[in-house]
Image (tube, grey):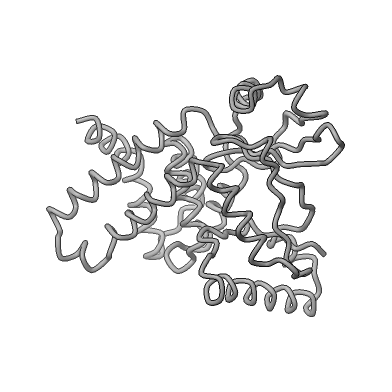
Amino acid sequence: MRNIWRLICVVWVLLPDYRTLRRFVRGDPNGEAPVRLVAHLEGLGPAFVKLGQMLSTRPDLMPQVYVDALSRLQEDGPEVPREVIRATVENQLGKPLEVLFATFDPRPVAAASLSQVHRATLPDGTIVAVKVQRPDLDRLVCRDLDAMEAGLALLHRLFPRRLQRTNLRAFFAEFRRYTLQELDFSQEGRVIDRFRANFQGRVDVKFPTVYWSYTSQRVITMSWVEGLRLHEAAKSLDAQAKQRLVTLLVDVMLQMFVSDGLFHADLHPGKAFEQG
């Protein structure tokens, strides 16, 4: 019953957005609709913000104005209060924030679906990025994933042939699997180390270093990497530099998929940078 009630709440919030989207696609534009959808996804919680991030990379499914609005969710989500961030870091790493870091900027440089990132300095002067998980995340994500699964099960009973054609259940199973894996930042750190080992010796690709003494299940500390986000690079680089960047990205993806068998499955524009 808990899953059904949550599902009803979600449908109540998103059904008007879905109807507006259908009218938009048929040629009845509504300038406020994309912004309203983003606000509703943020209000529903981190699992739906994650879903919005995925849709922001799918111009084949969403109109461009929706993609542009949803792109904000990639790194400009609602901020967690600084006192909650402090409590999470100290609880996870076992020491006061002032002992762990020489400096720790309370203002996040990015806030995404599951976490937010803060710039900090280690006691030896190394500048790092500290990624801190949002509070109560396990419960909130599992609650909403269970509600989505209940909704898909209901749709399967009502429209079995249509749901089989869309393959939505397989899509959701994969979405659930890797979303739950993302809740363990130590797992993320191990994958980053594997990526860096696979690309060892290449000077044109850089993966951050994970500082394991400052990493736990809900906090991960990595070396700070300066660069341009992809949309910034698209605006500022000349045609020749853009071509080199595109060639490099294709080469990196081919190595991940074909040679290494280990690839980034959520490489939206907020997670890739050009280092000039």
> Where is residue 140 shown, x and y percent of the image?
41, 33
- Residue 183 vs residue 26: left or right? right
Residue 99 sits above or below residue 187 on the image: above
- Which residue: 61% across, 21% down? 87
- Residue 34 vs residue 125: left or right? left
> Where is residue 146 shown, x and y percent of the image?
29, 40
Tell me where residue 61 sits by quadrant: bottom left
> Where is residue 72 shown, x and y percent of the image?
59, 49
- Which residue: 27% across, 66% down? 166
User: How many numbered discs, if any?
Assistant: 0
> Where is residue 164 shown, x and y percent of the image?
20, 65
Q: Quadrant of the N terminus?
A: top left
Q: Quadrant of the C terminus?
A: bottom right
- Which residue: 37% across, 65% down? 26
Comparing 109 with 58, the one in front is 109
Residue 85 sits above or below residue 260 on the image: above
Comparing 79 with 146, the one in front is 146
- Residue 75 vs residue 208: left or right? left
Comparing 60 with 138, the one in front is 138
Tell me where residue 104 sits by quadrant: top right
